[in-house]
Image (cartoon, coloured by chain):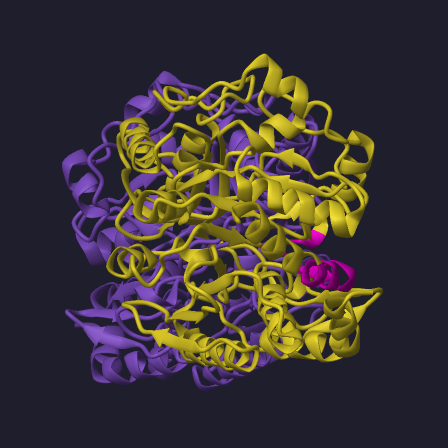
Chain colours: A yellow, B purple
Amino acid sequence: MNNWKIFQEQHKDRFLEELLALLRIPSVSARSEHKPDMQACAEAVKTRLEEAGATIVTIYQTDGHPIVYAEKIIDPSKPTVLVYGHYDVQPADPLELWHSGPFEPLLKDGKIFARGACDDKGQFYMHVKALETFTKTNSQPTNIKFLIEGEEEIGSPNLATFVKHNKDLLKADVILISDTSMLSMENPSIDTGVRGLSYIEVEVTGPNRDLHSGVYGGAVANPITMLAKMIASCHDENNHITIPGFYDDVLEATTEERAKMAQAPFDATEYKKDLGVTELWGEKGYTTNERTGIRPTLEVNGIWGGYTGEGAKTVLPSKAFAKISCRLVPNQSSAKITEKILNYFKSIAPEGVTVKAEEHHGGEPYLTPIDSIAYRAAAKAIRTTFGKDPIPVRGGGSIPICALFEKELGLKIVFLGFGLDSDNLHSPNEKYNIENFYKGIETIPYFHQYFAEMNA
Amino acid sequence: MNNWKIFQEQHKDRFLEELLALLRIPSVSARSEHKPDMQACAEAVKTRLEEAGATIVTIYQTDGHPIVYAEKIIDPSKPTVLVYGHYDVQPADPLELWHSGPFEPLLKDGKIFARGACDDKGQFYMHVKALETFTKTNSQPTNIKFLIEGEEEIGSPNLATFVKHNKDLLKADVILISDTSMLSMENPSIDTGVRGLSYIEVEVTGPNRDLHSGVYGGAVANPITMLAKMIASCHDENNHITIPGFYDDVLEATTEERAKMAQAPFDATEYKKDLGVTELWGEKGYTTNERTGIRPTLEVNGIWGGYTGEGAKTVLPSKAFAKISCRLVPNQSSAKITEKILNYFKSIAPEGVTVKAEEHHGGEPYLTPIDSIAYRAAAKAIRTTFGKDPIPVRGGGSIPICALFEKELGLKIVFLGFGLDSDNLHSPNEKYNIENFYKGIETIPYFHQYFAEMNA
């Protein structure tokens, strides 16, 4: 056992306690009532970074939620790793489906149940503990910077401005992000990309007020019915997306790439059982892994309109709403796709209703190279602690800021994620396996060591 | 001015005050939290009926909300009129669209704004004041019974049992109901029928939990999308309803009937302007009045699923829901149509989701004869106070209990409604014109007088 491992074993219970304290702060960036919690969470992150040995730790206020920056520079001649993460979390609702309070972390069966346990508090905190390991064992191999933001779950609206105005501060050799998953502890993997995102909200208005469905039903267009027709029209019978031009910029994966993807372990029976569905669904001509990795998708994230309470109300509502988002792949552009969807919805709006559609947020798709020093250092670190080479896979989620990092800072990203797809990200009962948390803290220092060595 | 009118003029302000007090009770039958308000409202109705001179007034408890029965029998040899009405109201939401509190009645521009102002507190209360007029002027021409229930807005689930067990109590010569509208004060009309109702709630379940739309989107069926497809499929391109067998039992109106309907005043420009829509919508081949009167319809009354809060949440939800109701015409059967809709939704459910559909409540369509003594008495009463013959029209709404009254009590119904279509029934800012309220109180005594005379 080396010094890192000895130190980590001695302090593992405290590491976990510290994470639980962070998880108790309901830092939901999407909800304005949590603004004070966002500030409190940023301050807690700052304190922890100071305790871990960072020499400079600063909270930058933005037009939205604060950004925490930290650094520990040990030697300007050594390579610099910029760790990016986020302390904000998704809204917790539907609350009634949680088995325990989303902000009252519960340890059970070797898992931490809480909103943000995996996404991303549990994951970025591994890096804070890696820094502490270096500090306490006096063995830091690289310069380390931290950029922990509070708006990832709402599309990082203020991070772009911050990055543009702080290029020197953020100067580094690589960006390291733990905000993705691996296939399993037995099949460790590294994500080689994230999908982009377009997120819109549609408001359909029919009559100027809610109407009695007996008096007016059948005589005016019902906005719910019209919205349903619009949503239904977004996919054809092969589950291809019908929005004109949607696939125009999609970079088709090569036969070779698809053959490689097909080698990743996938058990359809287990997958269906885990999700409780009898059949899978998706774009004809593609496998499940392709559908969630290399293909763009369109999902309705929420819908509402009319009477949704107990019992019955015979109303023909004035309005209906939907939240709809697309996952994008290279070389689709978030702005272009958003425009296409908005135009599509406006163009198919039947007479008798008006459609207002507006953008929530977006992000560009991003691919990482797998022949870079950083990727090789990450792969070697995983080989060291897992005893196995990681499988490169394309991630289905989105980290809106990746493309901007590359553009503004000229830096490549390496995704070193320790979550699992079954961690219920964005869902009730989000969890993170305690084992994965510790395994991440164990693995990360090796990345820094190998990255320094390979750059030497 | 006769004695009735003199008495009514002297007490008109008090009549209005009494109605406002009744409107302040939030007697929402669909919401369990209003159970105490339902009891309070029944007791208030009882007190008012006693004050108006009813000799027997009883509150009957049911498995749901209480029924108020009252009577004033003056002479067993005179004909008996059974007045039916309801003291329960529709839920008030969406609350944010009300300009004043739904249960804080506001008098403005000659209108009473409150939930229940027209439907049906304002209307049944006219009969209470007609009774008081008779009592105080000692001039009651008929025996009068009152049956004021608290569950009309939820489909009268307990009234049928009550009627079946109290046939003697409810013995009468005609049923008189003020729970419908007239075309306008300039074009008084009498509804000659109400449509039936089938009301169902659909629950579509996809995965067993809310999923991250990036990780799983595109790979499993989204219950919102599937529900949208099901709803979209309910109408074809001509806005005919596609549910198999839906129109099987529809009694087609004759060319003559349709020609007569076409004579009712209707101004499409005004209608559209009032509703704030640029185009009307509906079943091809029928006029607006036909669509809302003699044709069955299917409307989505509510829909919900996924994330509906502020901002964005990238979730692929586990469930989506809709409330859907049909208005039925003779000779459709509510039970049969409900079964057809339930079967249809289950049959079109795509693989990968499960559909649960259940019935809320229903009611049969009902037509009144226009050659009966009661209809002629009503028409003459309107001629007396409006100076014009009423136009017979088919009403679009539903009063679920009508068909049962006929079946169990062997009685015909006459609809003597004083509301207007623009009264925002079931909508925010429900109102009732003060003029219509007084006009109803003025007209109703003449109905009793003429009904007694014609039966003599």
Magenta stretch encompasses residue A187 = no
**Quadrant in which residue B100 is drawn:** bottom left
Compared with A301, B286 (above or below) is above
Magenta stretch encompasses residue A432 = yes
Q: In this view, does B280 lie to the left or right of A260?
A: left
- Residue B156 in sight in this render: yes
Residue displayed at 47% across by 51% down: A175
**Whole-percent x, y for residue A305 in the image:** 43, 50
Q: Nearer the viewer, residue A87 or A368?
A: A368
**Quadrant in which residue B8 is drawn:** bottom left
**Whole-percent x, y for residue A360 in the image:** 35, 50
**Whole-percent x, y for residue B304 in the image:** 52, 50
Q: Which of B202 and B447 is in front in this view?
A: B202
Compared with B83, A227 (above or below) is above
Q: Is residue B170 left or right of residue A39?
A: right
Q: In this view, does B172 lie to the left or right of B285?
A: right
**Whole-percent x, y for residue A44 in the image:** 51, 80
Q: Which of A113 and B31 is in front in this view?
A: A113
Q: Is residue B17 left or right of residue B194?
A: left
Residue displayed at 44% across by 74% down: A38
Q: Which of B54 and B337 is in front in this view?
A: B337
Residue displayed at 28% across by 70% down: B113
Residue displayed at 37% across by 69% down: A65
Total count of labels: 0
Bounds of the magenta segment: A423-442
Compared with B228, B59 (above or below) is below
**Quadrant in which residue B333 is drawn:** top right
Compared with A368, B201 (above or below) is below
Quadrant (top left, top right, bottom left, bottom right) of the N terminus of chain A? bottom right
